[in-house]
Amino acid sequence: MSVPETNLPTKPDLSGQPIERVHRDGVEYVLLGTAHVSRASVDAVNALLANESFNAIAVELCESRAQGMRDPEAFKQMDLFRVIREGKAGMVAASLVLSTFQKRLADQYGIQPGAEMKAAMDGAAELNVPLWLVDREVGTTLKRAWHSVGFWQRFSLLGGMLASVFERETIDEKEIEKLKQGDMLESAFSEFANESAPLYRSLIAERDAYMAARLREEAGRSVTANPCKVLVVIGAGHLKGLSEHLRIQQADPSETVAELAKTPPKAQWPKWLAVGLVLLIFAAIGYAFHRNTALGAQALRDWVLFTGGFSALGALLARAHPLSIIAAFIAGPIKPFRPGIPSGGISAMVEAWVRRPRVADFESLRDDIVHWSGWWTNRVARTLLNFFLVCLGTIVGEYTAGIHILKNLF
């Protein structure tokens, strides 16, 4: 008895999907290149899991990003005071900006960012095989990218990140598929990564080498029977580089991982430049008092008014609470006497105390900041905005005060 053709199981179509197979040290690595916002990529992951047998599944995720996928509500438990106090406001804000870029793309097509990674993670759980998280921590990558470029290019990066938040142009689904030429980090900084070799190295090339070393490291720990087969789900921008590193990498994988996971030391010249400027201004104030008490009092007044005034202006632009504005005015002039505690941090902590973020603010945070107005209406976002604008205002105030004081003296 013949079975109707319509009832025959159909094999999912993987044609056109970027796949590389690399054999090394008794392990077959099946590398699937994906777009992180793509229905086709999710289908490709499910197709491979349905039609081939794997001993382990590796994904282009670090522990923090994987945890975010496992528990997308975890950020609601964020301790805003601790974030500000530990100087992590910048990292949190950068992560939020990147998430809004992904969300803007995903909202157009009804698929969550990283859905293909989630499908791979779920597949590992269902098949009861090990899940390997092989990407470098996103915070380390962002720090290495930040430190890899010059002072002025950092302003361009910040502008590009902000533009990715407020861009409203609808993106054709064919363009979404073109993300297979990169990954979400590269896409957010695409213009700069293409033009900057150091930026490309930290965002893409270093991670290719890191993930290859992590795969070799995990395989060395886990492989007990040969042959072993591992599915590796990565952004397709890493496909060529990762497959090449898997074939030719000879260094000890643990040493490679440790070297590429280092956080670059902070550049010292901005710190010494700021210290030098403040010492010069204070020397000028002292010289003014030496020449004339009234002139010295005027110089000291200028320091307080300019640094405090611009700091308070930053809080005002963030639509901070009056107490936060007062705190910014007080914190600005005394910043040199409390190194390590930015004036924006003091004002932001006052803002978070006076206008304590509600559960609803955390719940709607990712949606609110997609629109520019949300940075002023959401209490979490406004506190972060207050932090940055007050810090910026203090810097402007210091330079303005210095120029004004020196000009009056000479």
Image: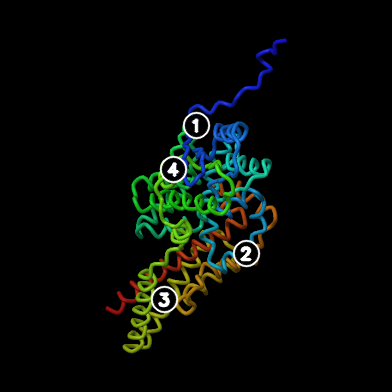
Q: Nearer the viewer, residue 406 or 389?
A: 389
Type of the residue with mark 4:
Ser
Residue 336 x, y percent position in the rendering: 45, 77
Q: Nearer the viewer, residue 237 or 130?
A: 130
- Measured in 3D between alpha carbons, the distance from the residue under mark 3 to the one under mark 2, in whole angstroms, is 28 Å
- Is residue 94 visible in this depiction of the protein? no
Residue at image location 36% in from the left, 87% down from the top: 289
For marks 4 and 1, the one nearer the N-term is: 1
For marks 3 and 1, the one nearer the N-term is: 1
Residue 352, numbered label: 2
| Circle 1 residue | 17
| Circle 4 residue | 243
- Measured in 3D between alpha carbons, the distance from the residue under mark 4 to the one under mark 1, in whole angstroms, is 16 Å
CA neighbours of label 1 inside 10 A, class few (<14), some (14 to 19), many (20+): some
* Residue mark closest to the camera, 3 vs 1: 1
For marks 4 and 2, the one nearer the N-term is: 4
Looking at the rendered image, the quarter that the N terminus falls into is top right
Residue at image location 45% in from the left, 51% down from the top: 207
- Is residue 181 visible in this depiction of the protein? yes
Residue 303, numbered label: 3
- Measured in 3D between alpha carbons, the distance from the residue under mark 4 to the one under mark 2, in whole angstroms, is 47 Å
For marks 4 and 3, the one nearer the N-term is: 4
